[in-house]
């Protein structure tokens, strides 16, 4: 029991510092991609998955 609680706590702690990426669609069916980095406070909203991938690659891999 304690190990399950501890595991959930650790998972929550780690996930709070991870980059969050999600998409939303408006009523017209247009999709927007959002990202938020809780460690840096940076966020972005772009119109395509390709733009999001490019931003992630430029921000975190170069």
Image: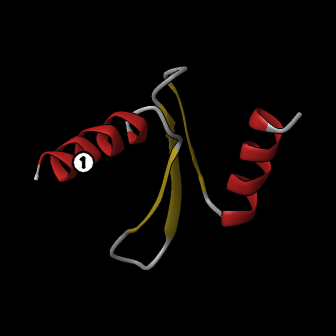
- Is 50 displayed left or right of 42 in the figure? right
- Residue 57 shown left or right of residue 27 in the figure: right
Query: Dot 1, how many residues are within 10 Å of its Cα: few (below 14), some (14-19), or many (20+)?
Result: few
Q: Residue furthest left?
A: 1
Residue 41 in picture, x, y percent from top left? 49, 22
Residue 40 position, x and y percent, is 55, 20
Q: Residue at left 76%, top 34%?
A: 59
Q: Nearer the viewer, residue 33 or 21?
A: 21
Marker count (numbered) = 1
Comparing 28 with 8, the one in front is 8
Compared to 52, does 58 lie above or below?
above
Residue lying farthest top?
A: 40
Residue at the image point whose x is 30% and y is 41% from the top: 12
The residue depicted at 79 percent of the width and 50 percent of the height is 54
Q: Residue at x 83, y 39 (%)?
A: 61
* Quadrant of the drawing holding the C terminus: top right
Quarter of the view holding residue 29: bottom left
Of all residues, the one furthest to the right in this rendering is: 62
**Above or below 12: residue 46:** below
- Give the image location of residue 33, x and y in percent: 54, 57
Q: Label 1: which residue?
A: 8
Q: Answer above or below: position of 47 versus 43.
A: below
Residue 28 image point, x, y percent: 40, 78
The image's colouring method is secondary structure
Query: Of residues 10 and 26, which is closer to you in this image?
Result: 10
Q: Is residue 62 above or below residue 40?
A: below
Direction from residue 18 to residue 49 in the image, left or right:
right
Question: Quadrant location of residue 10?
Answer: top left
Secondary structure of the residue carrying numbered label 1 = helix
Of 35 and 5, nearer the camera is: 5
């Amino acid at each position: 029991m304690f190990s399950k609680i501890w595991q959930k706590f650790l998972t929550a702690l780690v996930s709070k510092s991870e980059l969050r990426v999600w998409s939303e669609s408006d009523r017209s069916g247009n999709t927007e991609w959002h990202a938020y980095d809780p460690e840096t406070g940076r966020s972005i909203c772009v119109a395509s998955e390709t733009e999001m991938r490019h931003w992630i690659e430029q921000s975190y891999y170069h």
